[in-house]
Every structure is written in C-alpha cells, then in structure tokens.
Image (cartoon, rainbow, N blue to C red):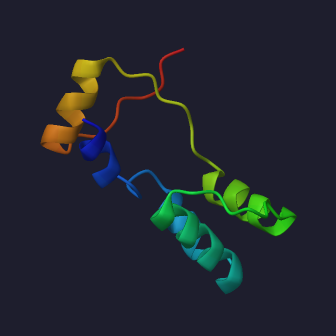
Amino acid sequence: MDEDLDGQSGRFGEQENLALLASRSRKQVNAFLKGRVLPDDLSPDFLQAVREVLTGLVKVVLKPEELRTVLRNGARLPRCRK
C-alpha cells in the first residue's frame, strides 16, 4: 500500500501550491521530495516554503478499506469526519 500512496503524491493540492513558490524555494522543496531527506540546514526559508506548500490541506480520516477503494478506483476522497 505504501507504493500506492507514493504514487498519489501531488493529487491533494500540494503540487498547485508548489507551483506558486519562488524558484529557489521550489527547488529546495523538490529536492526534499525527491530525496526524501531533510536538508542539514533547516533554514527559515525552507520551513516557510514547506508551510506554504501544505497550506490548505486538511486531515481526512479513512478506514483502510476506504483508502483501498480510493486508490484502486480513483474515487474522490470522502469529506472529513469529525
């Protein structure tokens, strides 16, 4: 299932936010996403860029079977449950 989730990167809005970053910030975040390793220097600029990319994302709680259905069928995620 991890591979399925890895393949979903960018489907939940972060790619749109990433495109809005300044070139230098976008390069830093892309390097992090590609290498999956945080930079040794967690500069304020890098942290701000990550915050901007994650802006607007909301927590969605799913049962394992719901997640499998979404991944298999490309269905939309259900609304958040409180």
Outermost left residue: 73
The quarter holding residue 58 reads top right
Residue at image coords 73%, 62%:
40
Residue at image coords 57%, 64%:
32
Residue 39 percent location from the top left of the image: 68, 63
User: Does 19 sit left or right of 41 as displayed?
Assistant: left
Q: Quadrant of the N terminus?
A: top left
Q: How many marks?
A: 0
The answer to whether 26 is drawn above or below residue 6 in the figure is below
Between residues 76 and 50, which one lies in front from this camera angle? 50
The answer to whether 73 is drawn above or below residue 48 in the figure is above
Residue at image coords 48%, 25%:
80
User: Does 80 sit left or right of 45 as displayed?
Assistant: left
Q: Quadrant of the C terminus?
A: top right
User: Does 5 sit left or right of 82 as displayed?
Assistant: left
The answer to whether 30 is drawn above or below residue 1 in the figure is below
Between residues 1 and 16, which one lies in front from this camera angle? 1
Residue 53 percent location from the top left of the image: 62, 59
